[in-house]
Image (cartoon, grey):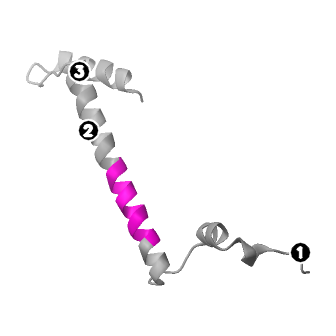
């Protein structure tokens, strides 16, 4: 669901419930950008921590990470 659809959905809901707190499209988009930025920062922090843990040997790499960091492991030209 896109941002515009969410605003339309919110307007439908608020028309049925007079006690609902209607917000403007600009307020919603501002909130959405802020929420997306927080989620992106959290993902980046998690990825950074995972990379540090892999570099220190604290956690085991999954197959994709192993392929990206040590592609020579998957070299089958010698067989």
Q: Which mark is residue 41?
A: none
Element carrying mark 2: helix
Q: Nearer the viewer, residue 22 or 26?
A: 26
50 left or right, relative to 24: right
Q: Label 3 vs label 2: CA separation?
A: 12 Å
Name the magenta segment's main secondary structure: helix
Query: What residue is drawn where x is 26% and y is 18%?
Result: 12
Say whether disc 2 or disc 1 marks the residue closer to the N-terminus.
2
User: Count the marks: how many?
Assistant: 3
Residue under label 2: 34
Residue 21, x across and y down, in percent:
11, 25
Residue wearing tag 1: 77
Residue 1, percent from left and from top: 42, 30
| Of labels 3 and 1, the one closer to you | 1
- Residue 64 is left or right of residue 56, and the answer is right
Range shown magenta:
40-51
Locate residue 35, reporting x and y percent: 28, 41
- Asked where in the image residue 32 lies, by quadrant, the reply is top left
- Numbered badge on residue 26: 3
Q: Is residue 54 above or below residue 41?
A: below
Q: Looking at the image, tell me whether mark 3 or mark 2 is earlier in sequence order.
A: 3
């Amino acid at each position: 669901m896109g941002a515009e659809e969410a605003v339309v959905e919110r307007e439908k809901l608020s028309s049925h419930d007079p006690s609902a707190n209607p917000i403007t499209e600009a307020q919603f988009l501002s909130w959405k950008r802020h929420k997306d930025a927080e989620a992106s920062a959290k993902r980046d922090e998690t990825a950074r921590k995972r990379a540090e843990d892999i570099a220190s040997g604290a956690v085991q790499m999954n197959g994709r990470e192993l392929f990206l960091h040590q592609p020579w492991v998957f070299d089958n030209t010698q067989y």
